Image: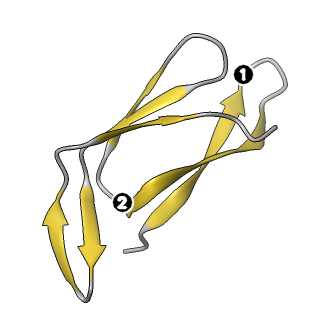
Amino acid sequence: YRFLATAELFDPATRGWTPGGRMAQARIWHTISTLDGDRALAVGGYSEVLGGGRFLDTAAVIEPDS
């Protein structure tokens, strides 16, 4: 598995991907929901911490890169 702290946003009109913002914590197995505009919400997941890991009880709003 690969822990990621970055996101890509899909545009159905162009069927293309654009770079998204960064999250404070790299995570896997999280859910993503779309918000108004180009933003998304990442909730929960699992994060690696100093060679160990833990399930997250946090959320992150992902803003597209400017």
Q: Does residue 23 sit above or below 17 in this rendering?
A: below
Q: Amino acid at mark 2?
A: Arg
Q: Nearer the viewer, residue 50 or 10?
A: 50
Disc 1, SS: loop
Residue corresponding to mark 1: 12
Location of residue 65 by image quarter:
top right
Disc 2, SS: strand
Q: Position of residue 49 (x, y in %)?
A: 26, 77
Question: Residue drawn at (66%, 22%), measured in percent from left and top?
Answer: 38
Q: Amino acid at mark 1?
A: Pro
The answer to whether the residues at label 2 and label 1 have Cβ atoms under 8 Å apart is no
Question: Residue drawn at (62%, 33%), measured in percent from left and top?
Answer: 63
Residue at far bottom of view: 51
Residue corresponding to mark 2: 27
Q: In the rendered view of the protein, which quadrant contains the N terminus?
A: bottom left
Decide if residue 61 is on the left or right side of residue 19: left
Q: Does residue 37 sit above or below 27 in this rendering?
A: above
Location of residue 3 by image quarter:
bottom left
Q: Position of residue 22 (x, y in %)?
A: 58, 51
Decide if residue 1 is on the left or right side of residue 4: left
Q: Nearer the viewer, residue 46 or 23?
A: 23
CA–CA distance in space, label 2 to label 1: 25 Å
Q: Position of residue 21 (x, y in %)?
A: 64, 45
